Image: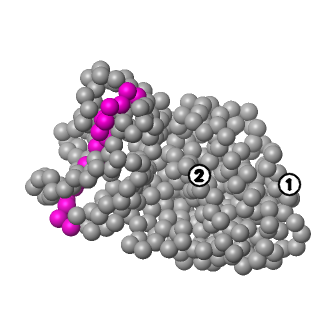
Amino acid sequence: MYNEYPTNLIFWENGTSNDYLYGSSIDFSSLNNVVFENSLMPSSVIIHSWDSLVDYQGNRVSTNLPLLEKSGIYQIEIDLNSSPEQSVYTQISFYDIAKTRIKTINIKGSRGTFIYPKNSFSYRINLINAGLHHFVFHEIKLREISEVSKEIQAKKFGLESLPNKIFDISKVTNFVSYKRPLNIIFNEPKKNFVPTLPKSVLKKINNLVLINDFRPFGGFYLSDDNHQDYEKELKESIFRLSEKFTSLNLIGFGPVSSFAALFYHQHSLTNVSSYVSDDFLGSLDNFERIQNLSPGLSKYLMNLFQENKFFSAYSINDSIKIYFRVKNNLSADHFFISKLLSTIPRLKNLPFAELNKTEMGNLNFSHA
């Protein structure tokens, strides 16, 4: 299903004053894996809260909640595991400009929807204790949704979506023929943000699949401590989608997504091409993103690059195509800010005719 709005990722970060600390043990092992323990905590007490409006001068913290549109319809999804089960619930309170609370809603499950009130000026999200002893918090996903969301129906082609809690693979859209390539785009995730790609670009690509990952920086589309079978599952999902097509194109448009395209390219045998930007992640130089990853994933990446297990095997050849060169598109004076710029406009440089060309033969993709 295409959603025209981006997904905001909300994490429980260390260094805030919004935690219940009395008798609590809080382990900030990674950005999306916070372990909280307190078996003596009273029920109905706030465990942690996030505010959309904060006093930076007084608290030295900035808000990590997105601005919401008045009367907008929003979907919220809370990813946590508690013991006992359902011993944590989510509360959202809305405030007017005078900081008077005008409405509160409680979400008992893992997902809910709400309308942001017209007269609301700010809002707060609370995690509330309902008899917990222990829980692991991953993240909250928050996004605006269309009033009427319609899924693209492709069942007659057998092109069902492949849902997964961590990564999300869309249905095949713009389907033309199995005799043309399957085009898979890895989205370029940020720390607290998963962007939505423009329809004006997506409609130019036939047989299109979009892959999202909702971990910080998409977890680089790799296995980590909590998802050890991630790579195996993603490879198998790509194989199931692509086995009917004659060829496969893996597409990235930034450091993480281009890395993912190249990483999963290595499991292909024939008829697979990668289209990437030249700033794909290939070393740990000046790459601060790994600091917020789980220890296991950070170590995995370090070994991958330091031992040259991956990129040393890659020389640019006919099956690996760099369609966007950052240095060619930025002046020397502006190159240093390239990491701050959106990478989405790069997609306009894709060779659309080449991606949509007719191919003969059978796709051979290793999913072992």
Q: Indicate whether 143 appears above or below 190.
A: below
Tell me the distance, in whole angstroms, between the alpha carbons under discs 1 and 2.
26 Å
Q: Indicate whether 199 appears above or below 308.
A: below
Q: Quadrant of residue 193?
A: bottom left
Name which of mark 1 and mark 2 comes first in the sequence.
Answer: 2
Please state the horizontal and vertical placement of residue 272, each as a whole percent of the image.
Answer: 80, 61
Local secondary structure at mark 2? loop
What's the amino acid at mark 2? Asn
The residue at the point 31 percent across, 36 percent down is 130
Magenta span: 118-135
Please state the horizontal and vertical placement of residue 230, each as a whole percent of the image.
Answer: 65, 44
The residue at the point 60 percent across, 46 percent down is 220
Please state the horizontal and vertical placement of residue 109, each as a whole percent of the image.
Answer: 39, 48
- Camera-side residue of 307 and 260: 260
Crowding at mark 2 (Cα within 10 Å: few <14, some 14-19, many 20+): few
What's the amino acid at mark 1? Leu
The answer, for residue 108, to whether it is visible in the render is: yes
Depth-wise, is mark 1 or mark 2 nearer the camera? 2
Question: The N terminus is located in which quarter?
Answer: bottom right
The residue at the point 32 percent across, 45 percent down is 90
Instruction: Residue 164: give its label.
Output: 2
